[in-house]
Every structure is written in structure tokens, then in C-alpha cells.
Image: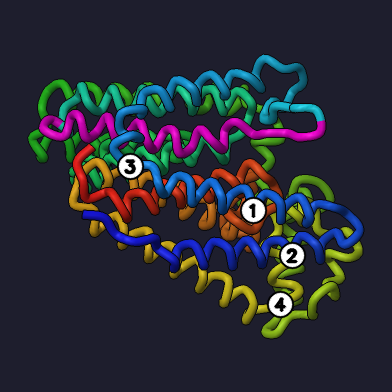
Amino acid sequence: MTRSFDWTIAICAVLLSAIGILLIYSASPTSVLWIKQAIYLVVGVLLMVGLWKIPIRLHYSFGWIYFVISLVILLAPILQGGDVKRWVHFGFATFQPSELAKPAIALVLARFFYDHKKDIKSIKVFSGAILITAIPFGLVMIQPDLGTAMVFIAIFVCSIYTAGVDELTLFFVASPLLSIVLSFHWIPWAVFYVALLLILWFSRTRLAAFLTISIGNFVVGVLTPAIWRSIHIYQKERILVFLDPGRDPFGTGYQIIQSKIAVGSGQFWGKGFLQGTQTKLAFLPAKQTDFIFAVLGEQFGFIGSFITLLIFFILFFRILKIADEARNEYARILATGLGSIIFFGTLVNIGMVIGLMPVTGLPLPFLSSGGSSLITSFCILGILQSIHSHGIEGP
């Protein structure tokens, strides 16, 4: 049994992309970026239709091959010179390998969890899934690209939760992140660590898991301050300026301050198309890419931002619907993992623009300028279309 093409998802994606092209043009009317984005949109739609026709069982069969290919392409920019190694250059075009690695990780994790669904809560499965995620995470951090690396964690958490892991287990999985946050002062970290040990004890956690979680959190808590001292200065500043943009108003904090000014100045109806002063006078940095939502807020105000967010909401709702209706466990896990890529990217980017999250460099799906992001987003939708049409069949 198969189902038809999901036109709601396709229309939402094309509408968002069209809004993105309009905003890119308004940000740089004299450049050809909007023309390139329109070409990328056509390519993306064609790939979405092509992937829709591929049975989901084929993606299951090639899961590990996708993973190996993703690691190879992630190595390509690292082998190049320079401090920032995120792109591969092909003459007149550039490509960001980490974008394609996102769906590849979702594909391999879905297969891994499906193959081990009977012992999904075992230490062996947890360790294997963490290793699968940690390898591309490390390669992307070398580039360095913290935002994309965090997407891999989002894929891992959403996939393993859909596979059947309960909330308490997820808390134990997330506990090292809490240790990282709290480890900058020994008192709150010590309180958290003691509380964690008590939760482990009263939940009657198996000895192997007890030792793994407790020792892991201890190591993370001890090493985090040392790692903080060794990371790039600009990465430290992004976090510190997120907490206090006024710390460096003409440096690292400049982006967040100008972005919030642009969004706020749009008020309810916006200043009008091509009328944004922050955009036109070049006060807003990365206006075609990371801060495209600020351009939207300035020129089209609350009403334009609301309509765009509503389209995103409809898109997310349909993705969740596809995951919920998938009768096969593999298809359900895969749909959730793929959906988390778009959802996490949207949440972090918009949160960054309005000052609720640190600047990470994650593009806004479908809207931000860039062929790698747009084409990958449509490829994700193509696989989701395949799940919608063929996902009820076993892999």
C-alpha cells in the first residue's frame, strides 16, 4: 500500500524558499545571490521529487554506506588550508559537506536503532549510538562549526527517544551536558553530581550503567574548565556576549545588538519591502545568511514574521504526522531524526536572531542564502515524502 505525494509539505517548503529569495534580493539588490538561490530551489525541488520515488527500504539498505560517505566528505575541508575549514571549493561553486552529513547521520542512526530495537536500553546500544554520533561531531568541531555539531546531538536525542528510550534514561544521557554547564563553579556542579548519584541509586540503575554515567559525569565536570581555556577565543566570546551583548558592542556583540534593533524596528507592519534601514545601510551583518530573519522582521514586521512562522508550524506538524502514521519503526525513527534537523535549525537560528540563543552560524532552513543548506533541506523532505508514500512497508 502506498500513499500520494504530500503537497502540504512541498508547498510550505516552496513558499518559505520564495520568501527567502525575496529577502535575499532585498538585502542585496545589486548582487546575483537571489538568482543563484532560485536555481538552487529548482534543483532542490527536482531532488525532492526524485527521492520521493525511492522506496524507503533502499535507504535502510544503504544506511551504513551513507555514514561512510559522510565521514569521507567531512574530511575533505579539514585537509584544506586555513583556520576555518567548512567548505569544499569546486571552481566557481562551493559546497558545505556538513550539510549533507546531517541526513546521513539520521539515516544510519535510524537503521542502528531499528536493528537493535530489542535491547535499545542496553549499554552496548547506547555506546554504539554515541560513537556513531561522536565521530562526525568531532570532525565538524575541528572545522570548527559548533552549530552543525549540535545538530548531530539533536538528531541523536530525537532518534533514540522515538526508538523507545524513556525520559529518565534521556536525562542520564543529557546529564553530561548539565555537568558541562554547571562545572564552571564547583559548588553547583557538586550539588548536581550528588543529586545525580542519588537518582541513579533510587532508580535502581544497573551497576554497569551506574558506573558509566557517574564516572562519565565526573570526567566531564573535571575536564570542562580545562577545555574552556583551550577553545578559540571567538567561540568563548559568542557565549559570553550571548549572556551580555553589551560586553562587546562593536565586536562580537555587534551582530546580536544590530539584529535585535532590526527586528524591533519593524514593529507590527514592518518598514516595507526594500525600506529596511539596518539592512540598506549595512548595519546588519550576515544579512543574507545567518540573520535573514532579522531582514524579514525589519521589512515585514510582526505580521510577516508571524506568517512565516505559521508556515514553518504547518511544515513541522506535517512532518510529525508522517512520523506518527509510519507503521514501520525504522520509518518512524528516521522521520523524527530528519525532522529534528529542520526544527532544530529553525529554533536555533530564530532564537539567535532575537537574542535568546548564542550566535552559532546555523542557517535558517529554506530562507538563508546558500545552496548546500537549501538543497539538503529539500533532500530531507524528499526522504520524508518517501516515508509518507512507502514508509508503511518494512525495510
Marks 4 and 2 sit apart, C-alpha to C-alpha, by 10 Å
Query: Which is more toward the observer, 50 or 325?
Result: 50
Identity of the residue drawn at 32% across and 55% down: 388
Is 94 within the magenta?
yes
Nearer to us of marks 3 and 2 is: 3
**Any mark on residue 42, and which?**
1
Query: Which is more toward the observer, 14 or 203?
Result: 14
Marks 1 and 3 sit apart, C-alpha to C-alpha, by 23 Å
**Any mark on residue 261, and which?**
none
Residue extending farthest to the top is 79
- Label 4's element? helix
Residue kind at label 2, given as amino acid type: Leu
Q: Report whether 317 appears left or right of 379.
A: left
Q: Is residue 65 above or below residue 294?
A: above
Q: Earlier in the sequence, mark 4 or mark 1?
A: 1
Residue behind mark 2: 23
Q: Report whether 223 appears left or right of 209.
A: right
Q: Position of residue 301 (x, y in %)?
A: 69, 78
Marks 3 and 4 sit apart, C-alpha to C-alpha, by 41 Å
Residue behind mark 3: 55
Q: Earlier in the sequence, mark 3 or mark 4?
A: 3
Identity of the residue drawn at 22% across and 26% down: 125
Q: Which residues are magenta?
A: 92-119
Marks 1 and 2 sit apart, C-alpha to C-alpha, by 18 Å
